[in-house]
Image (spheres, rainbow, N blue to C red):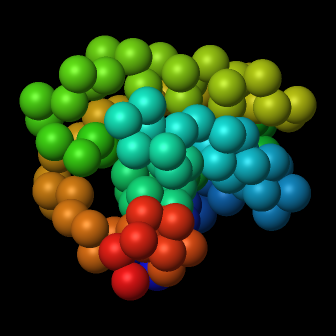
Amino acid sequence: MGVIQEEPLSADPSVDEGSPALKAAVFEALRAVQDPEIPVNLVDLGLIYQVLVRRDGLVHVEMTLTTPACPVATMLPGQVQNLVSLVPGVSVVLVDLVWDPPWTRERMTETARLELGLI
């Protein structure tokens, strides 16, 4: 199963973690984004590392790509930001593209592995 951290935006207890319904809607939007080279959504591919949601609608997404040389490196984060911003209740979307830890196939969900014939 892919690993997605869902932690508070800050260690400060005055910062809330947002509603579970809003977080679920954000993940639904993220599942609508597919890697153009691999016909699987970003969540199941394990490319979404962290999603933080606050009650005020601020959403912070940490994501990676399968490789730093990925030809869609400039396109996918913008697509994520755009689709998440359309979720009712979301006010601001911050997307950070990170390379650490590097993506590996082990981050993929079992569903993605089955779709791609890897198991």
Query: Which residue is at the front of the view, 111 or 78?
Result: 111
Q: Does 29 appear above or below 13?
A: above
Q: Does 114 appear above or below 19?
A: below
The reply, left or right, for residue 26 in relation to residue 76 is right
The spot of residue 21 in percent (x, y) is 86, 57
Query: Which residue is at the front of the view, 119 or 10?
Result: 119
The spot of residue 58 in percent (x, y) is 65, 34
The spot of residue 23 in percent (x, y) is 73, 54
Residue at position x 22%, y 58% in the image: 103
Q: Does 26 appear above or below 119?
A: above
The spot of residue 47 in percent (x, y) is 38, 51
Extreme residue toward the front, this view:
117
Query: Which residue is at the front of the view, 110 or 18?
Result: 110
Q: Can residue 68 be seen in this view?
A: yes
The reply, left or right, for residue 17 in relation to residue 74 is right
Residue at position x 43%, y 58% in the image: 45
Dividing the picture into quadrants, the one containing residue 84 is top right
Q: Can residue 92 be seen in this view?
A: no
